[in-house]
Amino acid sequence: MKKFVLIFFIMINLSLYAQKASIKDIYPDLKKKSQIDKSDKTIYNLLTTFYEKNLQADQEEMTPEDIQQIEKLVSDPNTKNLHILMLFLMYQQHISKTAAVGKKPDADFQIETMNILENETKDIFGKIPAIIYIYKAEALESGHRKDESQNTIIQGLKEYPDSIPLKVYSYLNTKDNTIKDDLIKNHSRHWMVQQFEIK
């Protein structure tokens, strides 16, 4: 998708952790060390902010303060539901590192990670953040599972009907002129509409 700020990962040395085993092996340990609190929405709100400022906004709007907040949460062992943030950042790091060297991301890693994040966010927060639908659709597409990707987009749009990235992916899959007209009329300046040259 879009280039993300790599500074997130300067203070987070997740790559060594991630190299030890598959995500299915790593995740239970991350979760075990995390304080799970279904009433604490800090991580949910952070994922929502990340989505709104990186994916939903016309142009990236992340600020140094946003990055500092992420760094603060990651470095504080008392952060509730930290396992979700750590897994999300591992995913981001994988995507960023492979893009930086011109490689394709590992689709199995992407799909496994998004499946876990989808289940965990739904279980803990009662709702799946929009960014998880988007990343899961991308992961499935990367794994050549187009029908599942489209189903994820459809489900995501039911939850987030105003999501521009989900509308873009839906249009690219269906070529639905109603979606295209909406994107051109209401979101022509959005970075994804421009990137995919929807005119």
Image: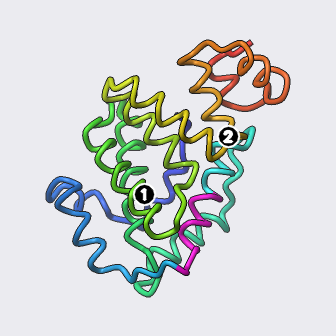
Q: Residue furthest right?
A: 185
Q: Which badge, 1 or 2, comes first in the chain's sequence?
A: 1
Measured as percent of width and height from the top left, residue 65 is found at: 67, 68
Amino acid carrying label 1: it is Phe
Measured as percent of width and height from the top left, residue 126 is found at: 52, 65
Q: In this view, does 76 lie above or below 50?
A: below
Measured as percent of width and height from the top left, residue 125 is found at: 52, 68
Magenta span: predominant SS is helix
User: Magenta part of the protein: which range?
Assistant: 39-49
According to the picture, the residue beneath numbered tag 1 turns out to be 88
Q: Does the magenta stretch include residue 48?
A: yes
| Residue located 53% across and 69% down the image | 43
According to the picture, the residue beneath numbered tag 2 turns out to be 163
Mark 1 secondary-structure assignment: helix
| Residue located 34% across and 26% down the image | 145
Measured as percent of width and height from the top left, residue 177 is found at: 71, 12
> Which of the 4 quarters of the picture holds residue 108?
top left
- Closer-to-camera residue (48/7): 48
In front of the other: label 1 or label 2? 2
Position of the C terminus by quadrant: top right
Mark 2 secondary-structure assignment: loop
Q: Is residue 121 above or below residue 103?
A: below
| Residue located 46% across and 81% down the image | 37
Binning the other alpha carbons within 10 Å of mark 2 as few (below 14), some (14 to 19) or many (20 upward) gives some
- Closer-to-camera residue (44/10): 44
